[in-house]
Image (cartoon, rainbow, N blue to C red):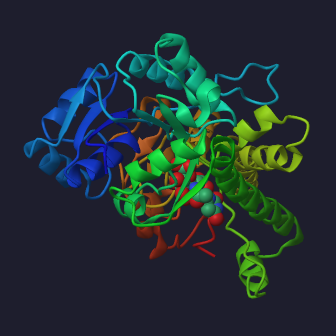
């Protein structure tokens, strides 16, 4: 393996674990991040994100001198870009959100300054098809003294490839090592160079393709899951109106050897599945109909849940001849975007809780065992323990299937179970 120094640009959920794994294989790793806080934290052998096993790896790597973090790129043999690729804020005219490639562009232009002949540049950030080629252009604009694959093919000075990450938060370290990788070079020699770099720690297969196919592979993986969840969410609405238990229905349908339906919920959250399908739709707006529709179905699901909450409020008011809903307490069980994590960002559960706080005049109890403090956007809700919520609420709204909620069940009151664990 000719590459001894690896530079990882962006030390977040993907970049930092990748840096730590390279360093654990005794490579010299220079992590680059625009946040001084992140740089200082890592150089102190600590981590700014919650991921099992990561802190220990970073501490060891820093103490042994294999990992250090810096603000500005330094020379290296391999540059791996793992910066965010969100979409731009949507205006009322945008039917499809537009990708924001500015972080990738800044990273590309910043590393261009320190590139030398023979270096490899790999993009890992989830990206619309064609972004790797764009990145190659941005770098070449900065360095007319070097040659690039788009103009010099296999003979280029710089090798450029796309290699998507596909790890699951909570299990990142082992998935980084064990999962198969799809590696798409702009040329055959670019693919080979990138495979050489990943082989340092990847035990799974490194499967070769071109950069556009690798970009689309990542988007397809997450779009496929989004479409699958949209089917489950649509079924849950249909079944509700037909008085059928959707979870029983799905488990029965899944007995068929060639059927494997996913689970409905209050919507799709997180930073990947709810974002990536739009990258396909933004590139192919007239052709990505199913993909677009799935996004719309999943984005609408939280509002369907809110209608259910309103119906429950009206029911309680009617039964108890109440003039207003001030005396009705609503408990929301779970705020995270999926079970057993503390991440509330882009969470349908948090969106639903926020909307309830806005319109409901009575108490809104928020039960989230994985956090100690409510974010500002949930001001007006009361963070409380599980038994208090079960004892106090008139409406029990189950939003996340955290393990803590599986062994309990409200003994009275209205129950709205969006995850099917309190059936
Ligand atoms: N969800 C459902 N029903 C299901 C499965 C999930 O409603 O049957 C919801 C979850 O509650 C959550 C959302 O979907 O709100 C996404 O959760 P997830 O666990 O399916 O996925 P992520 O976003 O944590 O990670 C995904 C993974 N991609 C796939 O499984 C295809 C992961 O492997 C990727 O690396 C990650 O996106 C990424 O970074 O792209």
Residue 118, horizontal then vertical, whole percent: 40, 32
- Foreground of the two, 413 or 62: 62
The residue depicted at 74 percent of the width and 19 percent of the height is 91
- Foreground of the two, 410 or 76: 76
Residue 337, visible in the rendered structure:
no
Instruction: Tell me which corner region of the image, top left, top right, bottom left or bottom right, holds residue 176.
Output: bottom left
The residue depicted at 69 percent of the width and 47 percent of the height is 213
Instruction: Tell me which corner region of the image, top left, top right, bottom left or bottom right, holds residue 82.
Output: top left
The residue depicted at 16 percent of the width and 47 percent of the height is 61
Residue 406, horizontal then vertical, whole percent: 48, 73
259 on left or right of 214: right
Q: Is residue 78 above or below residue 317?
A: above
Residue 197, horizontal then vertical, whole percent: 39, 48
Which quadrant of the rendered structure holds the C terminus? bottom right
The residue depicted at 71 percent of the width and 44 percent of the height is 277
- Foreground of the two, 61 or 117: 117
Residue 206, horizontal then vertical, whole percent: 50, 60
Disc tally is: 0
């Amino acid at each position: 393996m000719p590459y001894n120094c690896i530079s990882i640009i962006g030390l977040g959920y993907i970049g930092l674990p990748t840096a730590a794994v390279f360093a654990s294989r005794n490579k010299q790793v220079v992590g680059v991040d625009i946040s001084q806080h992140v740089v200082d934290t890592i150089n102190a052998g600590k981590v700014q994100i919650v991921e099992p096993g990561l802190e220990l790896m970073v501490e060891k790597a820093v103490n042994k001198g294999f990992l250090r973090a810096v603000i500005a790129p330094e020379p290296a043999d391999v540059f791996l870009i793992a910066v965010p690729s969100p979409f731009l804020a949507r205006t009322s005219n945008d039917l499809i959100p537009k990708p924001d490639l500015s972080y990738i562009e800044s990273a590309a232009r910043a590393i261009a300054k320190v590139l030398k002949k023979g270096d490899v540049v790999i993009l890992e950030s989830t990206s619309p098809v064609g972004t790797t080629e764009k990145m190659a252009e941005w770098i070449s604009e900065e360095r007319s003294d070097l040659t690039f694959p788009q103009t010099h093919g296999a003979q280029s000075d710089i090798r450029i490839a796309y290699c998507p990450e596909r790890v699951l938060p909570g299990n990142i370290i082992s998935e980084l090592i064990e999962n198969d990788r799809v590696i798409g070079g702009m040329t055959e020699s670019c693919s080979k160079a990138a495979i050489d770099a990943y082989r340092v720690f990847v035990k799974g297969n490194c499967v070769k393709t071109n950069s556009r196919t690798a970009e689309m592979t990542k988007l397809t993986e997450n779009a496929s899951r989004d479409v699958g969840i949209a089917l489950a969410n649509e079924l849950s609405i249909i079944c509700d109106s037909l008085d059928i238990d959707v979870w029983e229905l799905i488990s029965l349908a899944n007995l068929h050897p060639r059927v494997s339906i996913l689970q409905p919920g209050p919507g799709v959250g997180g930073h990947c599945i709810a974002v990536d399908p739009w990258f396909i739709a933004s590139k192919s707006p007239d052709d990505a109909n199913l993909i677009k529709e799935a996004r719309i179905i999943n984005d609408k699901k939280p509002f369907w849940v809110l209608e259910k909450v309103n119906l429950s409020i009206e029911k309680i008011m009617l039964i108890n001849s109440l003039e207003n809903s001030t005396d009705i307490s609503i408990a929301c069980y779970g705020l995270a975007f999926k079970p057993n994590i503390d991440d509330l960002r882009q969470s349908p559960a948090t969106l639903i809780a926020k909307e309830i706080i806005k319109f409901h005049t009575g108490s809104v109890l928020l039960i989230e065992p994985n956090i100690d403090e409510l974010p500002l956007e949930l001001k007006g809700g009361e963070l409380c323990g599980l038994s208090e919520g079960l004892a106090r609420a008139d409406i029990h709204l189950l939003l996340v299937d955290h393990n803590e909620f599986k062994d309990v069940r409200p003994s009275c009151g209205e129950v709205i179970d969006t995850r099917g664990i309190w059936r």
